[in-house]
Image (cartoon, rainbow, N blue to C red):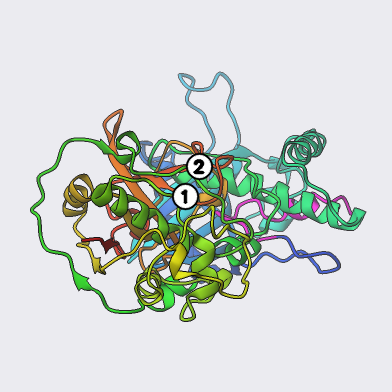
Amino acid sequence: MAPWLPLLSLLGLLLGADPAPPRQAADVQAREAAYPELLGPARFALEMYNRGRAAGTRATLGAVRGRVRRAGQGSLYSLKATLEEPPCNDPTVCQLPVSKKTLLCSFEVLDELGKHMLLRRDCGPVDTKVTDDKNETLSSVLPLLNKEPLPQDFSVRMVSIFKEFVTTYNRTYESKEEAEWRMSVFSNNVMRAQKIQALDRGTAQYGITKFSDLTEEEFRTIYLNPLLRENRGKKMDLAKSIGDSAPPEWDWRNKGAVTQVKDQGMCGSCWAFSVTGNVEGQWFLKRGALLSLSEQELLDCDKVDKACLGGLPSNAYSAIKTLGGLETEDDYSYRGHVQTCSFSSKKARVYINDSVELSQNEQKLVAWLAQNGPISVAINAFGMQFYRRGISHPLRPLCSPWLIDHAVLLVGYGNRSGIPFWAIKNSWGTDWGEEGYYYLHRGSGACGVNTMASSAVVD
């Protein structure tokens, strides 16, 4: 089987599941839905299709099949349906009488708390010779429904694009089988990125990134932090309120309070980078020196967190206090895996006195950031695997604030073309995003950006 064929079975799914690994059958993890469950979303899609059409010209629903995927409090329905349009006998519309026309449509319907939203509609004619029979099933209307869902040269173009990806990111694979599987994953991810793009309400552009040959599960396991959603960690005192008045825009990068973008590598240590970035900013503001601090010290010496398996900012602040400070990156360099703790209090260049939890009100976070420096936050990393540039604003059910899994650093805020954003320093290197930065919609609680904000305190 050609390595990209598993991709074809995923068309019609909003965010198709990952291809199976080598020697396993490709399997879509979205659940096959029974016809009664699909009827409500299908009727809604039909209503949207017929909106504005006069009586007598409206299409009727034929066969339906599809899948459903749960997302937060919503359900995403990926439907394939036949619609039958009545004959056209109006000489002002059609020059010759046209018999009943059957269309094959792909619909994406979001059902959130009982309210439907049509996210995608793509309809085209099918062979009318086999559709006049009311008992015709969808599979007989279009045998092998996914036979030609993509342009005929798709496979050839995908091979070329994948080869360019391999060259750009210097990829090597252990075997031909591994390379073929990675191309299958890559092809699937190209389609996933396009679907994420179609659903984004901001200006973000999604596409091929250095993570495009990883399955969703691999990416989550290697680069993200599941502990954030499972445990809030040590309870911190609330920061003193400072009001909510602030300048219309602010960027600590322009003020000298932010070090260069770092790279956590294949290690789920984002929590350590988020905290050191915050401490770097706090020390600069209080002591006037910007020092690049050691994340490796936290991986090795914070015995409460789990190093590359994840951690919590609140625990990291406690570890810094208990240890007696942080060494610099130069003295305790990053390795991206756990080593024996070799912290030396004599080499500690920075200390903290305490840590505080910040308000979940985004306007108050804006004011706090402008006055007090960069903020450690945690977010739901939905779509970030394929993020390239622009302001991300995913639908709330897709980027639930209750499913945060990545710690980052707020360094500023502003507006682009009237869209408010947070400027976020990530820890995946400068060859990701906008030179290592991520821009997220501000003011809507997007992806839970306001749910776990904190800062060290330096007296």
Query: Considering depth in this image, is 416 or 125 the residue closer to the camera?
Result: 416
Q: Are marks 1 and 2 in contact (CB under 8 Å)?
A: yes
Residue 436, which numbered label? 2
Q: Can I make out residue 145 in this image?
A: no
Q: CA distance from mark 1 to mark 2?
A: 6 Å
- The residue beneath circle 1 is 426
Residue 132, which numbered label? none
Q: Quadrant of the C terminus?
A: bottom left
Q: Is residue 36 above or below residue 256?
A: below
Residue 215, given in percent of the width and then of the height, sits at: 67, 59
Residue 291, given in percent of the width and then of the height, sits at: 41, 49
Estimate how packed mark 1 is, as few (under 14), some (14 to 19) or many (20 or more) residues with alpha carbons within 10 Å: many
Q: Is residue 324 above or below residue 397?
A: below
Question: Dot 1: what SS?
Answer: loop
Residue 382 colored magenta? no
Query: Considering depth in this image, is 350 or 419 the residue closer to the camera?
Result: 350
Q: Name which residue lies at 41% across and 42% down.
A: 50
Residue 33, given in percent of the width and then of the height, sits at: 57, 69
Question: Dot 2: what SS?
Answer: loop
Amino acid carrying label 2: it is: Gly
Amino acid carrying label 1: it is: Asn
Q: Name which residue lies at 24% across and 51% down.
A: 286
Q: Residue pushed farthest right?
A: 176
Considering the whole magenta stretch, tell me its main secondary structure: loop
Region in magenta = 1-18
Residue 10 colored magenta? yes
Residue 263, given in percent of the width and then of the height, sits at: 56, 51
Q: Report which quarter residue 391 is drawn in.
A: top left
